[in-house]
Image: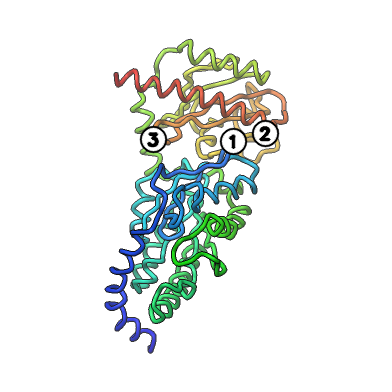
Amino acid sequence: MFWRITTKLARPFVRLWLVTANEGWARLPRPTGSPHASAPGEDPLRILLVGNGAAVGYGVLLHELALAGRLAVQLATVFDRGVFVDVVPDGGMTARRCLDELSQRNLFRYDAIVTTIGVNEALGLMSTAEWASAVELIAQRPAPIYMVAIPPMQAIREFPWLVRVLADRHARILNNLTADACERHHSATFVPFAPRNNADRARYRSWQTYDAWAKLIVPWTYERMFSRPDRIRSLASADEGRRQRALDELGILDTPREARFDRILTATQELFGAFGAMLGFIDRDRQWFKSAAGFETPEIIRSSAFCDITIRSTDVLVIENTLTDPIFRLNPFVTGDPNVRFYAGYAIEAPGGERIGALCIIDTEPRKFSSADSSLLRELALEVQNEVWATRLDSVG
């Protein structure tokens, strides 16, 4: 009761102080270039970082030196793959604004979403009911999401003592509500975040600080990011509708075969020594083939299409032995002609990021598929994707 009354009485004064404090934050250096960061490597992961505070990059001038860049480096080290990080930095970001941002994006194009929100709500002593409602909806997003905890407010020495005490207690309450929301949703993970005091002076943070923060976040992604249930997800109806609209707008369905696609498909079959190579697009209830080498059929029903699973994944989907795979062993193309025993496919995207089809290879014998093979298939798929996008530009022109 004491804290409830104190918080209620202090809220208008704290929010008035925040107006002045925010002016100070606005004068700090921060990255102003393209909101992206990357680490080199094969078969890159795609990460979306959304938030205030840590995500903004106060104190450095490049996103490569801020949290986005340090996450890219740390993730590349852990997963031994390249990493692309898109960042949405907003010093005024709230949970509601974060939810709006995620609702406007095609989240299926990302392997993971990382949020760093809550500092503004903790400092503003936001209503706990409003926070709980927002984080519950964020945790329901149809993609693996990692919600980083609000850091301890007591460590921010630039804030007045009373503000630190009240905000720190409020942050712990909000963090508990976030953790509860993540517990209720399999795709959401609560990431505790309590960095040590560092040598940075005032609000000028160094790249070493962001690197240390990234090291606290990355281990939480390792166990869950690529578990099978998360990699092969069902398509929510809203995302399926957007995906279908993107495919229709390309105007490629039911068009004649073209030499530019046939050339790539023939090369794909020969490079892998595969029984067949196909470029298929997932329509409403069918998979339609724009081009194929070694497996000649105009279309198949969607429920039997391996590529319908491929478009639910950001990785190269590899089934080295279909007879031992619980998802595919009863597929009619496994139990009957052409007796598929191996499959590998990589999704083709529309310009907006919607996964509309796949480049794939099949074989009639089980086989191994190396990381180098996966990288080659991905490069061939991106070459096909460029041609698909060129089709759209030609039709617009």
The amino acid marked with disc number 2 is Ser
Q: Label 1 belongs to which residue?
A: 43
Q: Secondary structure at mark 1?
A: loop
The percent coordinates of residue 190 (x first, y second) are 52, 62
Which SS class for mark 2? Answer: helix
Asked if the residue at tag 1 contacts the one at tag 2, i.e. Cβ–Cβ closer than 8 Å, the answer is: yes
Q: Residue furthest bottom?
A: 2
Q: What amino acid is found at the position of numbered circle 1 in the picture?
A: Asp
Q: Which residue is mark 2?
A: 371
Q: CA distance from mark 3 to mark 1?
A: 20 Å
Between 271 and 292, the one lying in front of the other is: 271
Q: Nearer the viewer, residue 10 or 280?
A: 10
Measured along the vertical axis of the image, is residue 391 above or below residue 141? above
The answer to which of marks 3 and 1 sits earlier in the sequence is 1
Tell me which label, 2 or 1, sits earlier in the chain.
1
Give the left or right position of residue 371, taking residue 138 as reference: right
Q: Give the image location of residue 87, x and y in percent.
A: 43, 48
Say whether residue 120 is left or right of residue 268: left
Q: Which residue is mark 3?
A: 352
- Report which quarter residue 363 is drawn in: top right
Q: Secondary structure at mark 3?
A: loop
Q: Quadrant of residue 56?
A: bottom left
Q: Residue furthest top?
A: 259
Circle 1 Cα neighbour tier, 10 Å, few/some/many (<14 / 14–19 / ≥20): many
Q: Can you see residue 234?
A: no
In the figure, residue 278 lies in which quadrant? top right
Q: Position of residue 311 (x, y in %)?
A: 50, 35
Q: CA distance from mark 2 to mark 1?
A: 9 Å
How many discs appear? 3
